[in-house]
Image (spheres, helix red, strand yellow):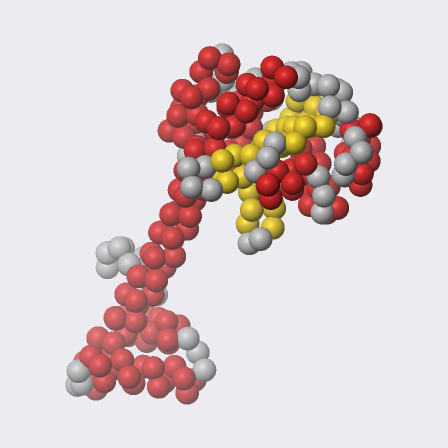
Amino acid sequence: MSSPFITKPDLLWPDALLSLLLSTDTVEGFLHELTLLTVAALPEGSMCGVTVAYDSHAMTIAGSDELTTAVDQIQYRTGEGPCLDTMSTAVAHHIPDLSTEPRWRAFCAEALASGVRSCLSLPLLGPLEAAGCYNLYNTHAGAFDDDTRGRMGVFAGNAAGAVALALRMADQSKLNEDLNATLASRNVIDQAVGIVMAQQRCPAPEAFALLSRASQNRNIKLHDLAAEIVTTVGGQTPCSSAFEPFD
């Protein structure tokens, strides 16, 4: 599997990271391309995953292939492994050969049975805190030599900022969605308040109080009641967006 952004990864890593951020449409797309960029700079037989902490749990948010995700899940399920230790300590962990590794025995046994022979976990240290962890796997023993580990340590430092930025972008996108939904709901309620004001010949606070009491008495959400009123009076469902003009 190759990425259209990859040319000479050893020379163009910072430029390639910027290209990924500017050229991918979604955070998921950026992170997936990031794993492919990473694999392109690793020895043959390598795989890459990116793990972050979410709601006090580790989760894989991108992987270069399905095996990477499956091996990451072994760590989460067994509760042990180099990735989890790197996440908690921000210290890199290297396993030259899973068949002789004395640590994390449960993880090593299952990962070895899956075809993985060596792995390297690197912290993604953002400007303020750890952004996550790189999980690098290879089907050959001793795949990550001193030179490879040194280069990947540098790349992980560069990638950490990009991952942190991507995650903040995702949070901002979710915030914008929530805000737009809130504004849309407010817009429908305001329309219903206007209708009640006209029908009852009362000021806005009194109209809103009437709607609130009706909502409680009927045991339905205020927004749903408002939408029902606007639909009944206007003959069509209310605007779905706070920024959508009336027909």
Name above or below for residue 125 compared with residue 229.
Answer: above
- Depth check: give the residue in front, 99 or 102: 102
In the picture, the quarter occupied by the C terminus is bottom left
Q: Position of residue 145 (x, y in %)?
A: 66, 17
Residue in front for this viewpoint, 167 or 185: 167
Q: Residue at x 65, y 42 (%)?
A: 84
Q: What is the count of numbered marks? A: 0
Q: Quadrant of the N terminus?
A: top right
Question: Which residue sits at x=53%, y=32%?
Answer: 32
Residue 200, above or below 39: below
At x 80% / y 41%, what residue is drawn? 106
Q: Residue at x 37, y 75 (%)?
A: 222
- On the question of residue 61 being in view, the answer is no
Residue 15 lies, in percent from the top left, at 40, 20
- Quadrant for residue 201, please give it: bottom left
Q: Quadrant of residue 245?
A: bottom left
